[in-house]
Amino acid sequence: MDAIIFNVTTAALMVLMFKAGMALLGEQTLRRRSVPWAAVALTGLAAGAVVLQLCWSGAMAALDADPSKHGWWRVLTSVFMQNGGIGGGAWNLATLAAMAAFAEWFWGGPLMLGLFLTGILLPERIDALFGEASRSTDPRNFAGSSGATYFLGATLAAALLLHGGHDGKGSRQEQLLALGVPVFGLVLWFAQSNGHGLVAAYGFAVGALAWFAFRRLRPALA
């Protein structure tokens, strides 16, 4: 039962971020937007890693983030490995495709990739800053793109709060939706030790900083 609740609440957090992305961009504008090639490439890389896992039995052992193994590359390659079975892998690929596309349309391709990379590297650095330098020994955390995806999705919620919807105006409903992402994320962290919630809070904070730093360079929403 605990696992079911964990999965349901984690999915609910993603739904909040998806709705925030839709509100930020405007659902009616999606059909006329250009192909988000950086998001396509990122998702293709993740899908290619799944194919590699299917073709090479040693892929996970060579590329995951098991702290008992050495390899500077593991912090990056582990993100593109999937260890949640068919359902979990499909969920991770689908949510990565959606969040990366939304983020590219709002932030632009280079900044979207930069934020995704930040979502990979920053949480570990924050843990070290607060004296929690040891890597997780939970095998569920040795691989998977969900952490970086939730981080990236939360940047959209921050942008929705600060920028407003696609028309540049923020309604009260949109503001509550945006704030719901870090608040619900922290609730999940404190109630379940759910790391997806914590990285969503990190992503929201970084998204706010990115909006102030790069808003003049961001592509037009229209």
Image: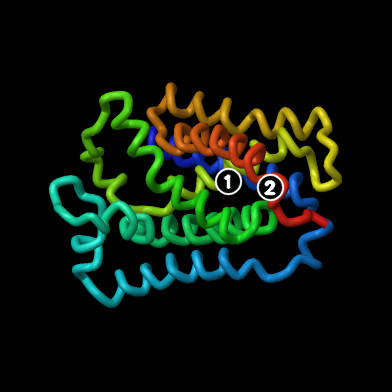
Quadrant for residue 182, please give it. top right
Q: Position of residue 138 (x, y in %)?
A: 25, 41
Residue where numbered disc 1 is placed: 153
Residue 1 visible here: no
Q: Position of residue 113 (x, y in %)?
A: 52, 57
Q: Position of residue 1 (x, y in %)?
A: 40, 34
- Residue beneath the point at 64% across and 47% down: 18
- Categorize mark 2 by other alpha carbons within 10 Å: few (<14), some (14-19), many (20+): many
User: Mark 1 and mark 2 in contact (Cβ < 8 Å)?
Assistant: yes
Model colouring: rainbow
Q: Earlier in the sequence, mark 2 or mark 1?
A: 2
Which residue is the extreme one toward the bottom? Answer: 55
- Residue beneath the point at 41% across and 27% down: 192
Quadrant for residue 184, please give it. top right
- Categorize mark 1 by other alpha carbons within 10 Å: few (<14), some (14-19), many (20+): many
Residue where numbered disc 2 is placed: 21
Can you say whether 48 is above or below 109 in the image? below
SS of the residue under disc 2: helix
In this view, the residue in front, 39 or 51, is 39
Residue 207 visible here: yes
SS of the residue under disc 1: helix
Numbered circle sitting on residue 168: none
> Split into 4 quadrants, where in the image is the C terminus?
bottom right
The alpha-carbon separation of the residues under discs 2 and 1 comes to 8 Å
Can you say whether 3 is above or below 172 in the image? below
- Residue beneath the point at 76% across and 66% down: 33
- Residue beneath the point at 47% across and 61% down: 90
Can you say whether 94 is above or below 44 in the image? above
Q: Position of residue 99 (x, y in %)?
A: 59, 53
Q: Amino acid at mark 2?
A: Gly
In this view, the residue in front, 16 or 132, is 132
Q: Amino acid at mark 1?
A: Gly
